Amino acid sequence: MEQRPPESFDDWQQWIEEEYLRTSGPVLLFADDESFERRLGSGGIYAAAALAAAVRSRIDLRASRAFDPLKPAADAWRRSSQACPPPVLPVLLLSVYAATRMHTNEKFTAHNYYDRLAEAVVLGDTDHDPAAIRTTLSEGFPQVADWWRLLHGWIENGAGSRGKSTIRSHPRLTRIGYPLSQAIVREADKAALTQFFERSLTVHDAVPDVDRLVLLLQLWAGRRTELGAAFRHALGSRLSTDEDAASLARMLGEIVAELAAAWDGIVRTNDGRQRLRLRVVLDFDRWERSWRVFGPTGPTVLTAVVGDESVELTKDDESGYYFGTELPSGDDLLLRNGWSVLAGAARLVHRGADFLLFRADRHLGAWSSVESLIPFEAHALAVARRLAPVVHDALRDAGVEFALAPEASAAELVPGYELFLYVTVLDVGIWEDAMRRADLADVEELSIELAGRPRLVNGLRAPALLGPRAYIEGAAPDLLIPAGIEPRAVEVSLNGVRQVFQQSSVGRELSRIPMGSGPYRLVVENTELDFEILSLDELAHALGDGRFAQANDFSSLQPDALCRTGARAPEARRGRDRYCWLMEDDSVREFAEPDEPALLDALGLRGAGVFTPQVPPGAIWLASSRRGRWFCDPIEEALSGFDTEFDVPALWTRRARSEMAGAFWARQLGESR
């Protein structure tokens, strides 16, 4: 849709007020040709020249100070009730437009800025030479800097009713610092930042301090190609020895902090729509692929049109997934190339890539695509075939064990990719070093989940009505500790039991700590995280059916409890024909699948399809069979999350110390070989 740009100075004043200042959030006066086109459609290509003409109509390019003709109007505004913004908005917006035209390889100096300002002022005008008017613009610019301070004060004096000012000064560039502060973050950058906030922040929690926020932003932004040149230039100056550049990075951090504080929890696309994820779902039992829409903050009902087919979807509030009409599986090329679907005010997006990362999802009973790795959690990694050898060597270098799906099987499930299974990061420092050596550090799917502050991850949450941080016993959460550049001592306290870790960027696996039902307080770097573990009896009681278990006494926790390790059973798939433990003494113990707790239906925990058996002493493998095919999971200190197909009897024969082990296996299971 095309709109004609404003023509007169007063028209521009009104348009800028309506477009930029009528918000309850952070105010950013970013202006470049692309932003004009976004706001005005195809008419935006004429906007910069129209703005320059409007400004020229109110200033005097022949005077020693070009902006003096506007001073009486600004002074009269100072004496007024100031119900409207200062009457100089077109000048301020043009000064930002000039700042956006500075080249990123230039130093941000006054000399370079006034060259760009002169070029902006004479856009569409053949009567003036930019070089000839540069001096009058620079001599008059102290007045413009004063007007920037006026606008900042007017916004802040509105006590939030006029939004929040992002206008910032610069310690040395005391005049041009104001427009520079508005030229760093584009509208497209603001949309991209909502993805950063989703990855690193929690809505309504306090925003990390500026230094930590900029560190997290730098870790995240290194893997983004959609950020603007000015944004990346300012961010890359964080550790610069140049004082001006470092100040620019801090200015960016302060602006991003304002945007983070005002974030509403919604991830947005460049066109302002809500961005919901199209997740790839892999069912390894059925060896099938499907798509599932994920969006905890999305609307309750979605209607999407995929090709000629209308798809109706309803959100499950517990899981954040949408269920209903199955999305078409689509062309295999969509995995690599990506695709998006409009659904009312939302856009469903799958960002195609050479890497696809998956993690087991209890809500789906399958593995869904995710954006980054979580320490201690098992993952599946699909890698474009041309890059698979590099990843194979990098995983070996990181000391990470994995199973590689047969090529034919991978081609059936994820065509064009190799499929690495059971990829679990246990030491973040070693992992990140290995990825850097393999030149894979900027691959988002191989990066560690960002944490702006300590937070809980993983675990199986109880229904929200039982509390915001209630987990089911046996499925406790893990702790993700914020990143840091240098290794540091981090003190962690669980219900008063303290432990100090030396680390830089790492998670801590709480789920290994024996935790019965009851309340817990986790204190990390002065951040308190309260959560509760609920037994099935307590959950049943909360729903009016069952006994209320007494809270355990946790005084027996030992000082080393936080780093305790030991055998942990992998999750076992329900519906298998047989289950058995393979013991260290070469014996085999068969056991039965437990009944599905009837309470889970009442809790709305749908489609898990797994159970965690209790590990007997001496067990080293969990074996299960389905339709004559045997699967095996090791039981070890590292987590296991994906079972691998083996010829279990033959494996056990090779492993056994006795040549009679094969016959012993057959006798134990009542099978013949």
Image (cartoon, rainbow, N blue to C red):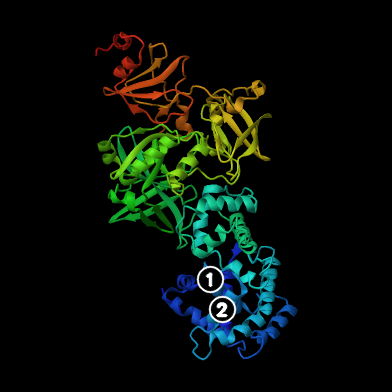
Residue annotated with mark 1: 100
224 over 414 or under it: above or below: below
603 over 330 or under it: above or below: above
**Label 2's element?**
helix
Q: What amino acid is found at the position of numbered circle 2 in the picture?
A: Asp
Q: Label 1 neighbourhood size at 10 Å, few (<14), some (14-19), many (20+)? A: many
Question: Taking the image as drawn, is residue 597 in sight?
Answer: yes
Instruction: Give the quarter of the figure containing the N terminus.
Output: bottom left
**Label 1's element?**
helix
Residue annotated with mark 2: 115
Q: What amino acid is found at the position of numbered circle 1 in the picture?
A: Thr
Residue 563 vs residue 320: left or right?
Answer: right
Please report contact status of discs 2 and 1: CB closer than 8 Å, yes or no.
no
Question: Taking the image as drawn, is residue 606 in sight?
Answer: no
The residue depicted at 45 percent of the width and 44 percent of the height is 437
514 over 347 or under it: above or below: above
